[in-house]
Image (spheres, rainbow, N blue to C red):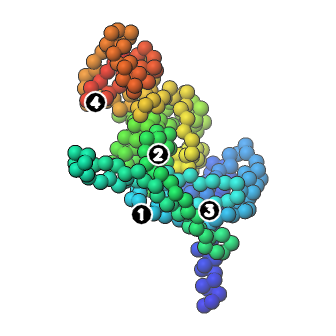
């Protein structure tokens, strides 16, 4: 029994790293095995050298610093934290964690009975194991300092979208219902227009993938029109070039640490709004021609235009160009030549 217990402990503490060589692999199986065993999956294209890829991983995991990591947020209510399970930390590496928290507030008669946010100096602890011994690293952080950081919020949104997509992909189900609504909402708010999410925020009908630099397969380049059903089938495929490409793309979203606008997508995130270039107009992604208020047209360089410039946020949106359309505070503004 002692040997059985030792074997069980060894298996439970093992990490599984999977590799798919070529395109004739089951990506869902490999990704699932790696996820369940706190490892990682990677794929080697036919033209790549497998020894280089495996060797790079070997060097990365040769020197573990901390294993079995857990974060303690010191009583602060947190949600939507990604990654959901912390991976091991290796020498020379880093782990970026993104999530949302509810800042405590208090009601005071001295502030007209309003809710007043509290500055949060909170102790956060990282617990782990180093060479078989428990270790804790603690530090104080002002969580309130990050509440208006758009870059952090956008990275959090990218990761959440990646997890929502991955959950649907591994389950082999279409992206629909609450998950689809959440992906669309986050994509529009934070400008997450990727080859995978682009089709979700278009009208029903043909899905035109926006970037020829990303491909699901040689037979169908990304900028070729395809039906929504065809796009969904490619997304849910288990094997083949499309499946490998999708697995890697979704994995990159789940691990996102930087977000940059893709020039091929004509996308900009400015002052809390995401704009995409549509027919020469920088259009707010939250604008819906069916439900948004009818646009009030303002001529470029008119007195009304210069009045808008006095608003700090509007001035940043106007800087996009001579033709801009956005919704804000229950109205739609369109700048026309």
- Residue in view at x 57 percent, y 41 percent: 258
Quarter of the picture holding the N terminus: bottom right
**Numbered circle sitting on residue 329:** 4
Quarter of the picture holding the C terminus: top left
Classed neighbour count for the residue bearing mark 2: other residues with Cα under 10 Å, few (<14), some (14–19), many (≥20): few
Classed neighbour count for the residue bearing mark 1: other residues with Cα under 10 Å, few (<14), some (14–19), many (≥20): few
Q: Secondary structure at mark 3?
A: loop
Contact (Cβ within 8 Å) of mark 3 with mark 4: no
Q: Secondary structure at mark 2?
A: helix
- Observer-side mark, 3 or 2, equals 2
Contact (Cβ within 8 Å) of mark 2 with mark 4: no
The picture places residue 271, in percent across and down from the top left corner, at 43, 31
- Observer-side mark, 3 or 1, equals 1
**Numbered circle sitting on residue 146:** 2
**Numbered circle sitting on residue 88:** 3
Q: Which residue is mark 1?
A: 75
Nearer to me, 23 or 185: 185
Q: Earlier in the sequence, mark 3 or mark 2?
A: 3
Q: Earlier in the sequence, mark 3 or mark 4?
A: 3
Classed neighbour count for the residue bearing mark 4: other residues with Cα under 10 Å, few (<14), some (14–19), many (≥20): few
The picture places residue 165, in percent across and down from the top left corner, at 46, 48
Nearer to me, 234 or 284: 284
Q: Earlier in the sequence, mark 2 or mark 4?
A: 2
- Residue in view at x 26 percent, y 52 percent: 107
Q: Secondary structure at mark 1?
A: loop
- Observer-side mark, 4 or 1, equals 1
Residue pushed farthest front? 110
């Amino acid at each position: 029994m002692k040997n059985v217990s030792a074997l069980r402990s060894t298996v439970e503490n093992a990490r599984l790293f999977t590799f798919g060589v070529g395109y004739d692999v089951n990506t869902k199986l490999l990704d699932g095995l790696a996820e369940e065993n706190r490892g990682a999956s990677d794929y080697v294209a036919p033209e790549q050298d497998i020894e280089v890829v495996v060797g790079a991983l070997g060097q990365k995991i040769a020197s573990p610093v901390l294993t079995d990591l857990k974060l303690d947020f010191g009583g602060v209510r947190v949600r939507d934290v990604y990654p959901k399970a912390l991976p091991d930390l290796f020498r020379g590496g880093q782990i970026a964690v993104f999530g949302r928290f509810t800042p405590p507030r208090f009601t005071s008669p001295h502030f007209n009975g309003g809710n007043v946010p509290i500055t949060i100096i909170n102790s956060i602890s990282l617990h782990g194991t180093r060479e078989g011994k428990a270790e804790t690293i603690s530090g104080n952080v002002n969580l309130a300092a990050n509440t208006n950081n758009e870059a952090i919020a956008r990275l959090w949104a990218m990761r959440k979208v990646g997890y929502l997509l991955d959950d649907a992909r591994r389950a082999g189900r279409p992206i629909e219902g609450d998950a689809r609504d959440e992906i669309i909402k986050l994509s529009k708010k934070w400008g997450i227009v990727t080859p995978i999410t682009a089709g979700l925020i278009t009208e029903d009908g043909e899905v035109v993938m926006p970037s020829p630099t990303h491909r699901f397969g040689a037979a169908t380049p990304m900028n070729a029109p395809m039906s929504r059903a065809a796009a969904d089938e490619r997304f849910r495929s288990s094997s083949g070039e499309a499946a490998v490409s999708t697995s890697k793309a979704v994995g990159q979203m789940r691990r996102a640490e930087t977000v940059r606008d893709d020039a091929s997508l004509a996308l900009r995130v400015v002052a809390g709004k995401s704009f995409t270039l549509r027919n020469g107009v920088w259009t707010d992604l939250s604008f819906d021609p069916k439900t948004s208020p009818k646009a009030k047209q303002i001529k470029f360089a008119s007195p009304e235009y210069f009045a808008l410039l006095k608003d700090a946020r509007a001035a940043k949106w106007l800087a996009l160009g001579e033709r801009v359309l956005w919704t804000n505070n229950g109205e739609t503004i369109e700048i026309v030549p």
